[in-house]
Amino acid sequence: MSGIFGIFNRSGKLIKENIVNTMLDAISSWEPDEHGTCINSSVALGHTMLWNTPEAKYEHLPLEKNAYILTMDARIDNRDELFKVLDLPDYSLEEMGDSEFILAAYEKWGEECPKHLLGDFSFAIWDDKKQQLFCARDHIGIKSFYYYLDHNKFIFSNHLGVVMVHPQVQRSISEKAVGIYLLEAQLIDPELTFYDSVLKLPPASILIITEDNVKIDTYWDPEESSTVHFKSIEEYSERLRELLEESVRTRMRSEYPIASHLSGGLDSSAITIIAARFLHSQRKYLHVFNWIPYPGKGEDPLYHEWGNSIKISEKEHMIHHGIKMDALDIERLYETHDISSSDTVNFWYEHLVQKSASDINVRTILSGWGGDELVSYDSLGYVSGLFWKGKIIRAISVLFSDATSRNRPYYSIFRKFYDQVIIPILPSWVYCRLPKIDCLTENRLKYINPAFRETLKSMNLSKKRIQKIGSRNEQLSLYNYGYLQTRIESWATSGFLKKIEYAYPLLDKRIVEFALGIPENLYRKKGYGRYLFRHAVGDIVPHDICWLNTKHEPKNARNFTYKQYLAQKIWLKKKKKISKSGNKYINIEYLLQELEELKISDPIFAEKEIEKVIIFELSILILGISLDKETV
């Protein structure tokens, strides 16, 4: 993990060293292992290094070589392959940093170089011959890239807050971004940030800046993934297993302890077992974290999600950690957290995971995020795809197969038909008015200031619906929706200050392309969704987790408990301040009325009351922006 930043005065004006030092100080607050800058007339690049991979200690960045200067935040996974085809320095592979591979790739392939790189990367190269700054972001968007651009200057970093310290970057809040956040509960957008003046470079994109020209282009599209064809389910399974093991292994290049999420579900269980066994071969142990607190007095220690997690960790000799969040933790987060430049996803337990991991010197956390949408996809769109393509008998046959193979009553077929065939084709205005359909966008409008609500209508911001007609359509819809990248970007930001970087084996480019290239029916067989993934890891993941879906998430153990703390400890304290704020985004009067009606039950909220607290949680973050930012 690295911190990167840069300035390019497109007007030719000389860089001011004091501004470079200000940005370096801002990106060095996490006390990096090494840092450096390079100023070349109208261009300055900066870098702060985290020694995580073994070869990182041999790197000194920014890297100046020939007519190029490089700064990067990267982990290159196909080093062996690149070593054979690139003109690289004459020293051992073990001592060669990833920066050498990136720069050599740029020298050989120019702006095509990202297509030849595997791994997670965000980098910028000043090309003195062409007088241009070449920037690139990895295929999936694991590494962040934020930038400010006008006619005179270009400013970038992999941390939004560092861009914002430049004195010429305006701090006006993007109302479109606020609107998306209010409707989605996250800022789900490939380019927007909470500031009008700062954008994100989308995943799989390059950005080339010269004195008088700007070029942004996409170099990879998951929709163009090649068809994958093998003769048997065993061959598909074997190839997937190879990819899984390789993607986990390449993300464990660290001289420090490795950690992983272990929820007790299928994806995290497979990843942690592969990782733990790899570490055991080196006489090391994997640390695993579960968001569920340790069981309290009188609670079953093997209950639900905790049970799966603890059983796997004991069997595979992992070091297991539970996380407990109390009211003080909640209050501390809400007093200090600013979504405008930090984590915008409300998985607050992850902040305690980061702290606990940092305390034991972990610098890499593996996550199974992205599996559900792609390689371990549950195939909810499979039946609708068959039905609406005219394969009606086949669609009904699959529903019957689901019921018989899983010992479900036949009347469940009608509900499955309704959920999987009828619901996906309904327009939103019908969908949101059906009983038991969760349509939070409609509910959240009540909590928005009426004047701002009109502003949102003029922006034509409507909550996206996932396409569920056909497996491939649904997978691409889930991927393109944007919430995968939102969580990735959020955790990258919040983990940065704790020297934590996240790695997502199931979002390896090779696995994503494999997932989108295999026949759709491999996701749904014998009554099981996620069939191929189950088949590929069935010999290592315990049978009850792999095939019986035993993962459950007890409401009183995680999500609902912390919302209860929130309502009790935070909102009641802030009531007076909120009532006087005159917030332009939130309908304060309606919000306070709902707050007064909130009745907190113990230990679990009633369903309607929980929904209110979700809205409150969402609103207070937006209030945090408007109350604390002088420009709003």
Image: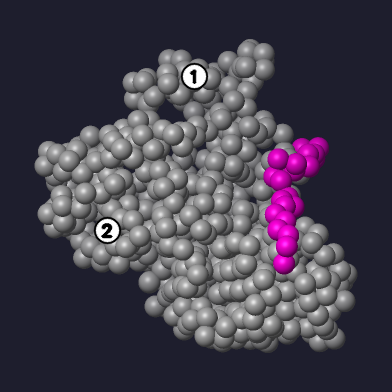
* Label 2 sits on residue: 627
Q: CA distance from mark 2 to mark 1?
A: 40 Å
- Along the viewing direction, whichever of 403 and 53 lies nearer the viewer: 53
Q: Earlier in the sequence, mark 2 or mark 1?
A: 1
Badge 2 element: helix
**Magenta segment boundaries in residue numbering:** 211-232
Asked if residue 234 can be seen in this view, the reply is: no
User: With respect to residue 361, does 502 lie above or below?
Assistant: above
The picture quadrant where one finds residue 149 is bottom right
Image coords of residue 512 (percent x, y): 67, 48
Mark on residue 426?
1
Q: Residue at x 71, y 51 (%)?
A: 218
Asked if residue 355 can be seen in this view, the reply is: yes
Q: Residue at x 52, y 81 (%)?
A: 19
Residue 246 belongs to the span the image colors magenta: no
User: With respect to residue 465, does 36 lie above or below?
Assistant: below
Query: Mark 2 near mark 1, Cβ–Cβ under 8 Å?
Result: no
Of the residues shown, which amino acid type is indicated by label 2? Leu
The picture quadrant where one finds residue 521 is top right
For the N terminus, the image quarter is bottom right
